[in-house]
C-alpha cells in the first residue's frame, strides 16, 4: 500500500522533469509539456476508472458521475472531498436544419479550496504562473476517469490564489 | 451502511494504485522521450535522487528513528521502517559484503510492478530504478562525513 506522500513527491518531480526537458521555453513549448502531463493523467485516470466495482458504473444521471468525482475519486486520490460543485448548463437553441438538434452541454465547476498539490507551494499570489503545471496531470486524471465512465469531456483548471483552484468540466455530447 | 464500507475499501485500493499507475505512466513517457533503455535508467535514477533528498526529511519527521550506529542498523531501518512506511513492504536484507559496506535488498512483492509487463524490446530497462535513486539521495543527505580523527 503506497503512502500518499509518494505520489506527491513523484508528481512534483515529474513536473520538474518534463519542464526541464523542453528545448523551447516559450509558450509553444510550455503547451507541449502541459499536454504531456495531461496525457499521463488521462491514462492513469482511465486505469483508475477501470478498477471500479460494477455497481458504481451504473449512474442514473450525469450529476451522479460528477458527485462521484468530487467525493469518491477525490478522497481516493487526494484524501479529501472537493469543496464545491457547481453546474452551469447551457442549452443551445436547435438549428433550423431538418434532422439536426444541438444537444445541451453540461458545464461543471469543481472547486478545491486547498488543493493538496498546491498547498505546499505557496499561499496567495506567489507562484501563480507556475500553478498550471501542477494542475495539468489532475485535469487529465479527471478526463480519464470520465472517459472510462462513458463520458467524453474537456477539463481545464484555473487558479486565482493558491492553494485554491477550480476545475472546469465540459461534457461533450455526440 | 454496507455501501459506506464498500466505498471505504474502494478508496483505499484506488489510493494505493495511484502511485503504481502514475509511475507506469512516467516510465512509458520516458521510454518515448529517450531512445535507449540506458538513458531511461539514468533519468529514473536522477529523478529518484531528487525525490530522495526531499523524502528523507519526510521520513525523519514521521518515523522518529534515532541516529544509526552502524551500517547494519541503517540497512534494518531502510528495510523495516522506510520501505514499510512508504511502500507497505519489508524487503529482505541479504548478500552482505565481507567488509560490511555493501548489501542487497530483495523485494518479493514490488508494488511498482503491479499490472506491468515489459515488452521484449526493453530488456535492459531497470523498471524500478527510481528506487535506487531515492535511496541514494536519501542516504547522501544523512551520511556521516568521513572523520579522520576519532573522538
Image (spheres, rainbow, N blue to C red):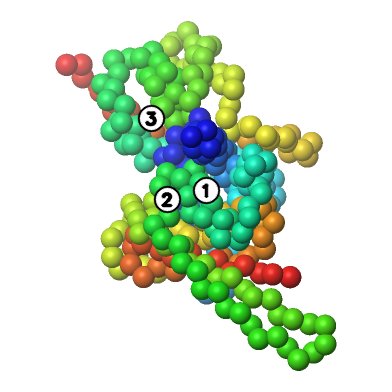
Residue B71 locus on image (x, y percent)? 37, 16
B118 relative to B22, above or below: above
Q: Is residue B67 left or right of residue A14?
A: left
Among all residues in the image, which is located at the extreme top?
A: B98
A7 relative to B128, above or below: below
- Quadrant that contains the C terminus of chain B: top left
Task: Rate crowding at label 1 as few (under 14), some (14 to 19) or many (20 or more) other CA atoms within 10 Å.
Answer: many
**Which quadrant of the figure has residue B85?**
top left
Report the disc number at residue B74. Answer: none
Residue B12 at least partly seen: no
Instruction: Establish whether labels 2 and 1 are both on one chain.
Output: yes
Residue A78 locus on image (x, y percent)? 44, 47
Report the disc number at residue B139. Answer: 3
Q: Nearer the viewer, residue B102 or B52?
A: B52
Q: CA distance from mark 3 to mark 1?
A: 35 Å
Q: Is residue A35 left or right of residue B73?
A: right
Q: Nearer the viewer, residue A89 or A17?
A: A89
Residue under circle 1? A73
N-term-proximal mark, 2 vs 1: 1
Report the disc number at residue A81. Answer: 2
| Chain under numbered label 1 | A
Considering the numbered disc 3 on the image, is that residue within a helix, a strand or a loop?
helix
Q: Residue at x 31, y 26 (%)?
A: B63
| Chain under numbered label 2 | A
Among all residues in the image, which is located at the extreme front?
A: B1
| Chain under numbered label 3 | B
Q: Residue at x 30, y 18 (%)?
A: B68
Instruction: Establish whether labels 2 and 3 are both on one chain.
Output: no
Residue A71 at least partly seen: yes
Q: Residue at x 31, y 36 (%)?
A: B57
Amino acid at each position: 500500500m503506497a503512502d500518499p506522500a509518494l505520489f506527491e513527491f513523484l508528481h512534483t518531480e515529474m513536473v520538474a522533469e518534463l519542464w526541464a526537458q523542453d528545448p523551447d521555453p516559450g509558450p509553444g513549448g510550455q503547451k507541449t509539456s502541459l499536454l504531456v502531463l495531461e496525457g499521463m493523467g488521462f491514462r492513469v485516470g482511465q486505469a483508475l476508472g477501470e478498477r471500479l466495482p460494477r455497481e458504481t458504473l451504473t449512474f442514473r444521471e450525469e450529476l451522479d458521475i460528477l458527485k462521484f468525482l468530487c467525493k469518491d475519486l477525490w478522497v481516493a486520490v487526494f484524501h479529501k472531498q472537493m469543496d464545491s460543485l457547481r453546474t452551469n448548463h447551457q442549452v443551445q437553441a436547435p438549428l433550423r436544419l431538418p434532422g439536426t438538434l444541438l444537444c445541451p452541454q453540461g458545464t461543471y465547476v469543481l472547486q478545491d479550496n486547498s488543493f493538496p498539490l498546491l498547498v505546499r507551494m505557496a499561499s496567495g499570489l506567489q507562484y501563480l504562473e507556475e500553478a498550471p503545471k501542477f494542475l495539468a496531470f489532475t485535469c487529465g486524471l479527471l478526463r480519464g476517469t470520465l472517459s472510462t465512465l462513458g463520458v467524453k469531456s474537456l477539463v481545464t483548471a484555473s487558479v486565482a490564489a493558491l492553494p485554491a483552484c477550480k476545475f472546469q468540466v465540459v461534457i461533450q455530447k455526440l | 451502511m454496507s455501501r459506506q464500507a464498500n466505498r471505504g475499501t474502494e478508496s483505499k485500493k484506488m489510493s494505493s494504485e495511484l502511485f503504481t499507475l502514475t509511475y507506469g505512466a512516467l516510465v512509458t513517457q520516458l521510454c518515448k522521450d529517450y531512445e535507449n533503455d540506458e538513458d531511461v535508467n539514468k533519468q529514473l535514477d536522477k529523478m529518484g535522487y531528487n525525490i530522495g533528498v526531499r523524502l528523507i526529511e519526510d521520513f525523519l519527521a514521521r518515523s522518529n528513528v534515532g541516529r544509526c550506529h552502524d551500517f547494519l542498523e541503517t540497512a534494518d531501518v531502510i528495510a523495516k521502517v522506510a520501505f514499510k512506511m512508504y511502500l507497505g513492504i519489508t524487503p529482505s536484507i541479504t548478500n552482505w559484503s565481507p567488509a560490511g559496506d555493501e548489501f542487497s535488498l530483495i523485494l518479493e512483492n514490488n508494488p511498482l510492478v503491479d499490472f506491468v509487463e515489459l515488452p521484449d524490446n526493453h530488456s535492459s530497462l531497470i523498471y524500478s530504478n527510481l528506487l535506487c535513486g531515492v535511496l541514494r539521495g536519501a542516504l547522501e543527505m544523512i551520511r556521516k562525513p568521513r572523520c579522520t580523527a576519532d573522538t
